[in-house]
Image (cartoon, coloured by chain):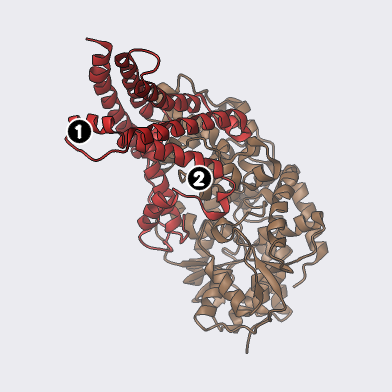
Amino acid sequence: MAVDEKDFQMFREGTQQLASMAPPSTMPDERRVEVAKTTMLAKLTADMAFELESCVHCGQCAEACHFYQATHDAKYTPIRKLDLLKRVYRREQAPLRWLHRLYTPDVTIDDLHEWQELVYDSCTECGRCFMVCPMGINIAAMVNVNRQAFANAELMPAELRALEMEQGSGYSLFGMGPEQVEGFLTHLRDSGVNVRMNESGVDYLLLTSVVEIMIFRDALLATIRVLEHLGLSWTIHCEGYEAANFGMLSGVEAVQKVAGDRVVRAVKASGAKTVLVPECGHAYPSLRWDQANLDARGQDFEVLTVSEFLGREVEAGRLKLRPIGKGKKVTFHDPCKLGRHSGVFHEPRVVLEALGVDFREVESSQELNWCCGGGAGVFLLNRASGLRQGAWTIKQQQLDATGADSVVLSCASCRLNFMNGARAAHWDKGIESLVELAAAQLAD
Amino acid sequence: MTLLEFARGPALQWSTIILVLGLILRIAGAWLLAHDKDYSRPRVDAAWRGGLRAVFSRFWPHQPFVRQTWFHILAGYVLHVGLFVVVFLYAPHIAFIRDLTGLNWPGLPANLVLFVGALTAASLVAFFVRRLVHPVMRTISTLDDYLSNLITLAPLVTGILAYAHFGGRYETLLAIHLLSVSLLFVWIPLSKLAHVITFIPSRFQLGAWLGRRGVKA
């Protein structure tokens, strides 16, 4: 269950090189402004309009935001991150646009440069702000609209640009493409792991991710062990194996669809009825909620994240786990994209209960949980390291208050950010994977 | 036509028409934008239940936020409940509405309404000051926020002055009070005060969006 420090270090160094790998953008500034505004207008829906019409500028969203709470800098107030979108809406689409134009300044290239930090570095789209907003404004969803506008204007951070371009053009990530992944899986099979590759007529299509392969291999092995233990028919398919979606994180919808379409093709090729998403926060909503809308048609397969799958199997009585015992004091971190954005709260707790550990819920838990500060690609942004660490300190305090010896996670991005944060803060508590814990306790 | 006749007649009539038509325009204008169909499989059917729940549940924050947002809870409740009491439970206002609509209901003692009106005005002053001094509120505030505050405050102040017969002839004070109400009616659809109605669809959509994902807003 231990993560190889060398692998983690190599990955960290790799992320630090990402920015230099992005090709420079040559889009003229005037064009950037035009493209950003056009994208915002195209993405604005009636729901968003109602929300923008309702804001009373109370600023309560700042109380829920880890980046504001960590810095107490008012520029990080969540609703302020929507200022450009608001201005474009008010000038171009609002019912009173004839009036708003008199006093609402148009968006400029300087605004776009200033807001880049606000919609990328200082927002993980965690959504805690929409849980406090008295008007119910979905700030996270509209920050994502901003990201799409910035991405189309080629104004996304270089790290995300490098990754979305790599994933969009050749399906590789961090230099690891289908050939390397197939080679890795073959190596696993040769070393005795029952890896099922490119099979058809199966029930489950198992996805993995480059982070899992590079660092969290034990999580992948644990998932395979559970599937085999349950005697399920499953496969990893080289047509579409990657769960991570840097199109989604960067705001490039075309790449998000390309990456999602590959999974859909793998579903068809394998005949799977269920896609099993590994411990990866953003991958789940991308496939569970977004993909059907990008396809503009319903999905004929189910999407489960691994913690959800485990919980269902335990509840159904098919998966029996040997209790670890109350001597192990753990808490659980609900990844924002799995919890607050997707409703996966109950299942991981079912697994922890089956493990018989001394489970300690954090204060402000589940849909109100604090984000770790690294989601939505923020973990990869070099210049955001200070902001990220500040946000993680809030998380750390929340965890410490439980008195638990370790925190259990079901998201690789969170896990990376926890490891990074813990290392910087000399935090000595355990950071564990839910599926690894479960796989280690399979009952005969 | 005296100033009072103007305030009671055309000013109030036209401002009411602007209020109603303006709010319809605000709602319709937003409603006419794209309604994206959601093709994903809902975790929970009948998402509208989540929407309906959010319309009401957002009247009070989730427990972890109560301590941090105490000012908004306190001042917000004083403001909104106070406005309701002053507008709908003051006998002369009830009589005014009865003459227009035929509807009638009992009011509260005038002194009590006066006290509530003063508290309500104080909450608006508190919001105004907080906008000026709190870094977050100052940063995100616009002219609309300050004007909306003052224009809401005006009928309260002029009403109290008229009740106390303080500062001029009663007819003049009453006319000014009615004109300040007309100004508020015109301002509501032009400003953030349209949230008197837009808060309903705004809360509903978040509650429904989260509801179909199995999350309570």
Q: Colour of chain B?
A: red
Give the quadrant of residue A102. Answer: top left
Q: CA distance from mark 1 to mark 2?
A: 37 Å
What amino acid is found at the position of numbered circle 1 in the picture?
A: Arg
Of the pair A357 and B123, the residue shown nearer to us: B123
The residue at the far bottom in this view is: A444
- Residue drawn 69% across the image and 36% down it: A24
Q: Is residue A36 visible?
A: no
Of the pair A259 and A10, the residue shown nearer to us: A10
- Residue drawn 49% across the image and 72% down it: A272
Q: Which residue has dot 2 on it?
A: A133
Q: Position of residue A425 (x, y in %)?
A: 80, 55
The residue at the far top in this view is: B1
Confirm whether circles 1 and 2 share one chain: no
Q: Position of residue B1 (x, y in %)?
A: 22, 9
Disc number placed over residue B204 in the picture, else none:
none
Disc number placed over residue B98 in the picture, else none:
1
Dot 2 falls on a residue whose secondary structure is loop
Q: Are marks 1 and 2 in contact (CB under 8 Å)?
A: no
Dot 1 falls on a residue whose secondary structure is helix
Q: Is residue B68 visible?
A: yes
**Chain shown in brown:** A
Subunit bearing disc 2: A
